[in-house]
Amino acid sequence: LLHDVSHELRSPLARLQILIGLARQDPAELANALDRVEAETQKLDRLVGEILTFSRLESGELQGQQQDVYVHELLESICDDAQLEADAAHKTLLLSPLPDAVVQADAELLYRAFENVVRNALKYTPQGAKVQVHAEVQQAWLIIDVDDDGDGVPPEMLERLFLPFFRGQSSHDGVGLGLSIAQRAIAAAKGQIEAHNRYAPDGQQCGFRIRIKLPLDTRPRQ
């Protein structure tokens, strides 16, 4: 893990050094270089934040406060925010009608998990295609599916998607920690998360699915 962290930190730091060198060589490019330095600094800040979150989840330090979480409200909020991103990328984000469901979890951690999964789906689905979020109750479980119309993942890589710093499609920007954080946040809520390729009735691969299962809190409420 330390090797991977070091590798991930070196890339943005190297780019920052190059930009500083370019600005010194050509003062006329200072404003442009500063804009790019700011962008790289923001990426570095996000990277460090995700590494810290992952580390605290992995060590058990960040378990969160268990409380009633209304999952339908959480998903509606996430999809409302992600809709702007989808529109800007000429993609469609569809949220199916959700059942009212309550689980015991840390709301902030669960929000982070769902947000990572939805934004990941938007990132990998092509322009003009859609991402669909669907939820249903099955016995004592709430099942949430996030489907995209992307290329999916080679079957031999599916189990590796939740490893830290693993990128199924390295051509996309990203740290490779989103699904690792989601897995540990879901586990903290005593749930499960799985990745599957989707197939059409004729057997052709037609997309990708992340399925999240959370135990329902069925205690009576006043």
Image (cartoon, rainbow, N blue to C red):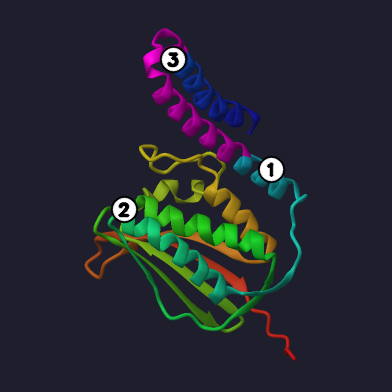
Q: Quadrant of residue 173?
A: top left
Which of the two discs, 1 and 3, sits closer to the camera?
3
Which residue is tagged 3? 23
Measure how far apart labels 2 and 1 are at the Cα level: 32 Å
Q: Quadrant of residue 184?
A: bottom right
Q: Position of residue 68 (x, y in %)?
A: 70, 75
SS of the residue under disc 2 = loop
Q: Position of residue 26 (x, y in %)?
A: 39, 11
Crowding at label 2, few (<14), some or many (≥20) Cα neighbours within 10 Å? Answer: some
Q: What residue is at 50 percent from the left and 50 percent from the top?
A: 159
Which residue is tagged 1? 55
Q: Give the range drawn in magenta.
A: 21-48
Which residue is tagged 2? 89
Q: Does the magenta stretch include residue 212?
A: no
Residue kind at label 2, given as amino acid type: Ala
Measure how far apart labels 1 and 3 are at the Cα level: 36 Å
Q: What residue is at 57 percent from the left and 38 percent from the top?
A: 47
Crowding at label 1, few (<14), some or many (≥20) Cα neighbours within 10 Å? Answer: some
Which residue is more in the foreground, 171 or 37? 37
> Is 63 left or right of 71, judged from the image as shown?
right
Residue occupying the far left of the picture = 202
- Identify the image quadrant of the N terminus: top right
The tag earlier along the polypeptide, 2 or 3, is: 3
